[in-house]
Image (cartoon, rainbow, N blue to C red):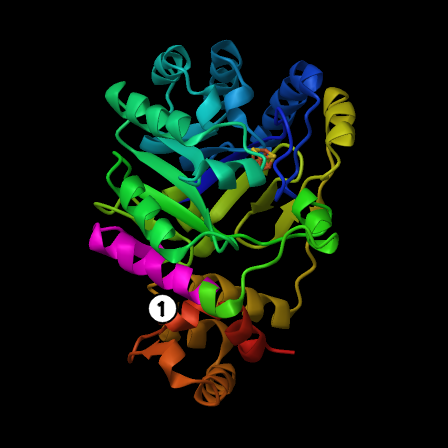
Amino acid sequence: MSGIYLHIPFCKSKCSYCNFCSIALLKQKTDFLKALENELQANSKNINEIEFSSIYFGGGTPSILNYNEIQNVFEVLYKYYKFTKNCEISFEANPEDLSSEYLKNLKNTPINRLSIGLQSMDDKILKLLRRRHNVERSVNSVIDAYNLGFENISVDVIYGINGLRSENFENHLKEICKLPVTHISAYHLEIEKGTLLYRLLNENKISEIDDSLSFEHYSILIDTLQSFDFRQYEISNFAKNNKISHHNSSYWDRSIYYGFGPSAHSFDGKQRFYNTTNIQNYIAEGLKNNFSVEYDKLSESDIINEYLMLSLRTSKGLNLEDYQQHFGNSELSRLKAKVSKLNQDWFNYTEKFLSLTKEGMFVSNHILINLFVE
Ligand code: SF4
């Protein structure tokens, strides 16, 4: 499994919780696409032997691209790279962009999986999050996409928002599960520095959810999605009929992936490297065909910690035999000793795998800090 990620860094406006690499300067779109094309072409010389099994358009908002712009990107991809026959091609879209006409056009591209930023089934929360759509638009966009032939649809949901009553959240999830979706990515709201919500929090205009309500929401999430046959295969990801995101799974499996566009990360099987997060610099340098990447210099401890972090995110968990082969007996003993000192209700332990229970996944950050090599 190996994937290509394309970062489209534009949004029409900034959501109140967002600290992703995105700007609202749409007039730079043409220059950006040229820079992206240059980057795809320049890197193809090194990696044109790989047969990629996934492409992921993320952002930002890929659905700000029009049909011709999307087709041009595919032309470049198919000119310089090889792909498997059943390549999974995901495209992130905001509901307000998904008019019937736009969806019909998308259906004429190779895209075969949509990831729609639904976020909430409560209009007040959508306003707080500064999303541009309302609930009606989200629901219609999913139904229209399905009716126009998209059978693999994922939606994003944000939970852990103070003020959202548990019974309402449960009802919202049930409504979402009844939509023709095969995959749900659910993220707990994190109020990050530099966002509008962070400012509102500091001005005491909003408050953060307390831990017990947060856990209640999390339990409702797991139990409700499970009752609709959505299997949790990663901390934040649930799939029905085994329609997991193959692209995202390649990150957790430590498979090869190459990222293009500002802030995009890559892993070539040995090293991790990433592009500049400065969108203006990316465009300016890309137009001159002058690309540079920063390499992560990982120590042995970093590599072990990364392995722990990625594998324990998945419901399959950490393969103990593989871990021993990679890092040796003494490291495996160290890990087991650390695990034994923590709450055993957080772990599923079998002969071959160590994974986190529902309770464990909720406190995964705390667990990881305790398991990490210093
Ligand atoms: S649409 Fe996504 S990337 Fe754009 S501002 Fe909102 S959260 Fe951020």
Which picture quadrant has residue 65?
top right
Along the horizontal axis of the image, is 163 left or right of 147?
Answer: right
Question: Horizontally, is 86 left or right of 203 in the view?
Answer: left
Q: Secondary structure at mark 1?
A: helix
Which residue lies under the disc numbered 1?
Answer: 358
The answer to whether residue 195 is magenta is: no
Write down the region rendered in magenta: 214-233
Q: Amino acid at mark 1?
A: Lys
Q: Position of residue 139 (x, y in %)?
A: 34, 29
Quadrant of the image occupied by residue 224: bottom left
Image point (69%, 45%), residue name: 195
Q: Is 223 included in the stretch rendered in magenta?
A: yes
Q: Is residue 23 left or right of residue 213?
A: right
Q: Residue at x 32, y 79 (%)?
A: 349
Nearer the observer, 338 or 260: 338
* Magenta stretch secondary structure, dominant: helix
